[in-house]
Structures are given as C-alpha cells and as structure tokens.
Amino acid sequence: MSMAGSFLDTIVALAILLFEYMGVGVIIFAGVQGIINYVRRDPLTRLKLAKGMAMGLEFKLGSEILRTVVVREFSEILIVGAIILLRAALTFLIHWEIKTEEAATGEQIREP
C-alpha cells in the first residue's frame, strides 16, 4: 500500500473513533440530562432528550459514512450500508418525534 493510502487509512480511523466517542458522549450526556429533567418534572423532558439522542446519532452516522472510505470487501460494504440505513431510520424517527412533540407542546427548544 502506498504511503498516501496508509496516511488516509490512519486519518479516517482516527476520525471514526472521534465521531464514535462524540456520539456516545452526547447520548450519555443527553440521557443524564433527561434523568435530571425528569426528576425536576420539566414538561419538555422528552423533547430535550430526543434532541440530544438525535445529535448523538448524527455523530454515529457520520462515523459510519467515513467507514465506507476504508471498506475493502463487498460483504463489509453490505454491513456498513445496513448500519447506515438503520441509523438513518432511527434519526428520521427521532426527528419525527421531535416535530410531533414540538407541535403538541407548542414550544421549540432553541439550540445553543
């Protein structure tokens, strides 16, 4: 393998790890914040939790898209493609839930 190819593999592997960890971190943070908001009886708990989960899944989806750069075999492409479809479907459902919840509460949470 050429030096450029090896460099690309290293950069992509590091970016995948960064996005995976960021996604996990955001989901954990949103979950803890959701527990705190639930205890405080915040009426927007579901909406805030759904937005946090959606953001975490976006990072995870980004890592899967990057993973397609270093895929070498067709079977790996199928697995990565299935994971991308699953995460995209989850993201779509969460965004649908966010819109439904915003319509029900009549409020929108501003992003920081």
Image: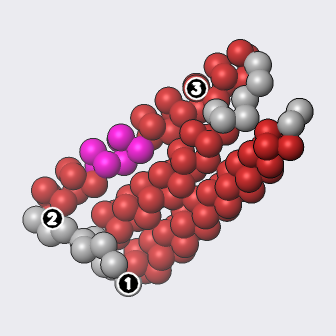
Give the amino acid at mark 1: Arg
Q: Where does residue 13 sit, x and y in percent of width and height?
A: 75, 49
Q: Nearer the viewer, residue 73 or 86?
A: 73
| Residue corresponding to mark 1 | 40
Element type where label 2 sits in the image: helix
In this view of the protein, can residue 32 be seen by the observer?
Answer: yes
Instruction: Please tell me whether residue 91 is drawn above or below residue 104 in the rendered image.
Output: above
Q: Which residue: 54% across, 33% down?
A: 84
Furthest-right residue in view?
Answer: 1
User: In terms of image quadrants, where is residue 50?
Assistant: bottom left
The stretch of residues the image draws in magenta is 91-97
In this view of the protein, can residue 13 be seen by the observer?
Answer: no
Alpha carbon separation for disc pair 1 and 3: 40 Å
**Mark 2 residue crowding within 10 angstroms, few (<14) / some (14–19) / many (20+):** few
Mark drawn on residue 81: 3
> Which sits earlier in the primary sequence, circle 1 or circle 2?
1
Mark drawn on residue 87: none
Q: Which residue: 45% across, 71% down?
A: 34
User: Which of labels 3 and 2 is toward the front?
Assistant: 3
Mark drawn on residue 105: 2
> Which sits earlier in the primary sequence, circle 1 or circle 3?
1
Element type where label 3 sits in the image: helix
Task: Give the overall secondary structure of the magenta segment.
Answer: helix
Element type where label 1 sits in the image: loop
